[in-house]
Image: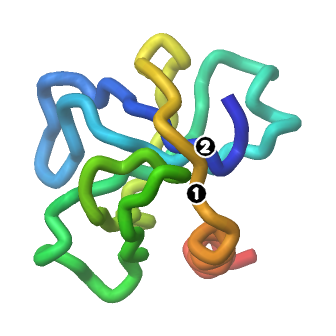
Amino acid sequence: MQYGEIWFVNFGDTGVGHEYRNTRPALIIEANEKIHICKMITLIAFSSKINNRISDDIFVTKNLTNGLFKDSLIKVQHITSFDTKRFINKIGVLDEENLGKVKKYLKVHFNV
């Protein structure tokens, strides 16, 4: 597992409120230096419901590199951490342009 990879992740069966659930693609945003410290990995969920886009969402076109089945949104507000046991398989990696957009958003989100 590495920063910038896209994995299928089991978000579980029961989400509360606006939490995501079921299996979906997610982007690893944890620094490579921190990934092996514990078994929790920080990630951001993708959604294929592109009509529900809000201003901070990042649109990603499906391609062979990212492995997405559909054009999707990176739901940057949905930052969470899961045990590595929830990670099913790697499907691809995010391109540098969109990864730069994620980094820019995270700086604003965390006020750094």
Q: Residue at x 31, y 25 (%)?
A: 10
As drawn, which residue projects farthest toward the top?
85
In the image: residue 12, left or right of residue 40: left
Quadrant where the N terminus sits is top right
Mark 1 surroundings within 10 Å by alpha-carbon count, few (fewer than 14), some (14 through 19), many (20 or more): many
Q: Position of residue 45 (x, y in %)?
A: 37, 50
Quadrant where the C terminus sits is bottom right
Q: Residue at x 40, y 69 (%)?
A: 60
Q: Position of residue 53 (x, y in %)?
A: 22, 78
Q: Position of residue 98 (x, y in %)?
A: 57, 72
As drawn, which residue projects farthest toward the bottom?
55
Pick whichever, 38 or 8, lies toward us: 8
In the image: residue 15, left or right of residue 101: left
Element under disc 2: strand
As drawn, which residue projects farthest toward the front?
64
Q: Looking at numbered disc 1 in the image, what kind of residue is underneath it?
A: Leu
Q: Which picture quadrant has residue 104?
A: bottom right
Q: Residue at x 51, y 35 (%)?
A: 81
In the image: residue 70, left or right of residue 74: left
Circle 1 is placed at which residue position? 94
In this view, 31 is above or below 33? below
Q: Which picture quadrant has residue 74?
A: bottom left
The alpha-carbon separation of the residues under discs 2 and 1 comes to 6 Å
Q: Looking at numbered disc 2 in the image, what kind of residue is underneath it?
A: Glu
In the image: residue 41, left or right of residue 16: right
Q: Position of residue 51 (x, y in %)?
A: 12, 77
Circle 2 is placed at which residue position? 5
Pick whichever, 21 or 93, lies toward us: 93
Element under disc 1: loop
Q: Which picture quadrant has residue 16?
A: top left
Q: Answer whether labels 2 and 1 touch (C-beta < 8 Å).
A: yes
